[in-house]
Amino acid sequence: MESTQQTSFSRQVALYSVMQDIIHCGPISRASISKQTGLSKQTVSELVRILEGEGWIRETGRTSGHVGRTATTYELIPESAFMAAVDLGGTKVRVAIVDLAGTIVAEVVAPTHPDGGRHVADQIGDLVSRAIGEGNVAANTVRQTVVGCPGVPDVLSGKVNFAPNIAGIDQIDFRTAVSEATGTKTLLENDVNLAVLGEHWLGAGHGIDNVALIAFGTGVGAGLIVNGALVRGASGAAGELGYLPFGADPFEEESLRVGAFERVSATHGIRAAYLATTGKDVDVPAIFDAAASGEVAAREVLDKVATQMARAVAAIGAVVAPEVVILGGAIGSRPEILTATSDELKRCFPFPIRIEPAQLGHHAALSGAVAVGLTELHTELFAKSAPGAVITLPTPKQGKLAGSAE
């Protein structure tokens, strides 16, 4: 029995090795696969026949321009399987249908259902169906859905905690509700975690093993990749940066609900600080405009925000020492904030940390959802029980997911 299992494991490892070569190097010949994997030509030929017979790969032609006989080449069939990537926010839901090569074939956006809870789950199901139709995709080829959402998904209960902008998703098994609405296996992940995964795959953190992304906007959150792996923490709340114990008084009751740091650095805190100084209740873009036109009060408010951001970067630096910290979100992505934060960081932290702007914009979390979903999908389809299987994702031919950042 043990020998049979070892044979099965060995064959599965060989199968996913062949498939990985075809995904990353296709069109590629069987001889080239044999050379790169170290598998015999006979074994490669057998596995290629299996993959071709199951509809995952296809012949693309024959090699030319070489001395000797030509060889048949093979490539992945991208449309052999799909996944749905969902970026769920307090104001918008963005849904993309993505093929096995990582290319978006359809994308739809809608205002988030105001009633929250199961209404949002059903809305995601409707949007996935709409995107499937727009992409002319067979519904039964969509294997799974990955949802990026604010807050902390609970792996056991399927609820999403600490997501006040979407009512009711902490009161139901939201994961199961989405799974039923889409008819697919569903995974939930924090949206900022997905954003750092997206930037690590296709954006400002590409090829960097230690990177953090801080999203500053309506709220504050961070995604952390340490030694190439996403850090979630014991409760899944790693990166809930708003709860850093500085900025406002962390012992005030309000700081348990919103977070001491978020109270002074996110949208509400910036507006409140400007109102207290000038008596004007305006939105954050107007405060940036006032600072750009030379208003001293606006500039002082934003300078204080940059100082608080530098403290947050320093706190992350002291604990995990990332090579790069990526700033994103409606506030963090402003070039004047990025420059001021970099300058302030030098005043409070002695070790070098590069601060870079996010590159993927609104597509960061969506790209991360694709990265998670494709990894799961490739593992399920090709690695299965192969011990130690390491799936590396293809880079979409466009250089990033279809649809440029907004």
Image (spheres, grey):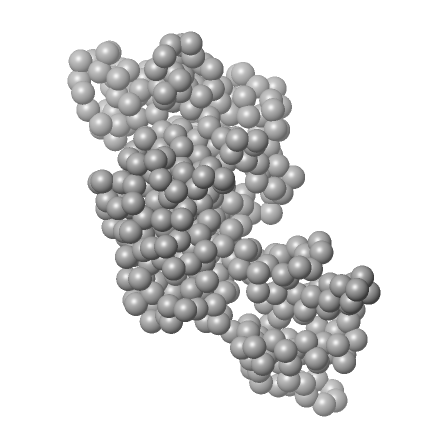
Q: Is residue 230 above or below residue 332?
A: below
Count of marks, rendered view: 0
- Residue sticking out furthest to the bottom: 69
Q: Position of residue 217 (x, y in %)?
A: 34, 31
Q: Position of residue 341 (x, y in %)?
A: 45, 25
Q: On the image, which quarter does residue 319 sit in?
A: top right
Q: On the image, which quarter does residue 299 sit in?
A: top left
Residue found at x 46% / y 49% = 187
Q: Position of residue 226 (x, y in %)?
A: 61, 37
Q: Which quadrant does the N terminus fall into? A: bottom right
Residue found at x 71% / y 56% = 387
Residue 78 at least partly seen: yes
Q: Is residue 319 above or below residue 120?
A: above
Q: Is residue 55 above or below residue 384?
A: below
- Residue sticking out furthest to the front: 1
Q: Is residue 385 left or right of residue 370?
A: right
- Residue sticking out furthest to the right: 3
Residue found at x 61% / y 42% = 229
Between residues 121 and 164, which one lies in front from this camera angle?
121
Q: Position of residue 391 (x, y in %)?
A: 62, 57
Q: Is residue 212 left or right of residue 105?
A: right
Between residues 260 and 311, which one lies in front from this camera angle?
260
Residue found at x 43% / y 42% = 158
Q: On the image, which quarter does residue 52 sit in?
A: bottom right
Residue 293 at least partly seen: no
